[in-house]
Amino acid sequence: MNRLIFFMLVIAVYFRLNEIGVNEACKLNEIVFKNELGAGKRFEYQCHDGKTNSGVRYLNNNARSGIRFKDTGKQTSLWKCVLKHGVTKKYYHNIEAYLPIENNPRCGQLREYTARPDAIYFRKDNYPPVSLYNWRT
């Protein structure tokens, strides 16, 4: 009888862990924006996925801010953002800040975008930043 109880317990734990999957212990993904445009220059960004809109946010020089979200693999998020700077927000760029992979959730991903006068620099996870987008006018 004890063996039957132990066997049933093992089966229950196995199916519960299968149901939960990796996603319950999954760290949140993060999109970070940094302003390195120079003293007195503000950076503006607005991001959205299919359900969530971050609203317009402003960053002063050397400030950083971001968005944290969960990628479940079933309800994945394609995050699109509009980045702007300049007195009349003359300089801008539309980017796809986070591209999901269907049925393959990713955990603890970092996407960092740094606004500099010459371009928008991108850094993924622990890699060094690279110039990715030139500003449009």
Image: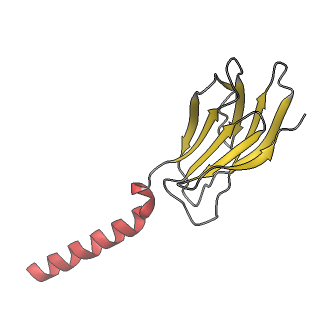
Residue drawn at point x = 87 percent, y = 38 percent: 136
Of the pair 87 and 77, the residue shown nearer to us: 87
In which quadrant is the C terminus drawn? top right
Above or below, comparing residue 28 to residue 107 in the picture: above
Residue 31: percent from the left, percent from the top?
A: 59, 43
> In screen coordinates, is 68 left or right of 101?
left
Q: Nearer the viewer, residue 91 or 6?
A: 91
Quick one: which residue is furthest to the right in this view?
Answer: 137
Q: Is residue 136 left or right of residue 126?
A: right
Q: Is residue 67 left or right of residue 42?
A: left
Which residue, as the protein is rendered here, is positioned at the far left? 2
The colour scheme applied to this rendered structure is secondary structure
Total marks shown come to 0
The percent position of residue 111, horizontal first and vertical second, equals 60, 48
Query: Could you say where residue 1 lies in the image, as x and y percent from the top left?
Result: 9, 81
Figure quadrant of residue 73:
bottom right
Q: Residue at x 66, y 42 (%)?
A: 113
- The residue that appears at 70% across and 29% down in the rendered structure is 37
| On screen, residue 35 above or below 88 | below
On the picture, is 82 further left or further right than 74? right
Quadrant hosting residue 118: top right
- Is residue 1 in sight in this rendering? no
Q: Which residue lies at the image location 44% right of the left edge and 51% below the top edge?
A: 27
Of 103 and 87, the residue lying toward us:
87
The answer to whether residue 9 is above or below residue 29 is below
Is residue 79 something one can see in this rendering?
Answer: yes
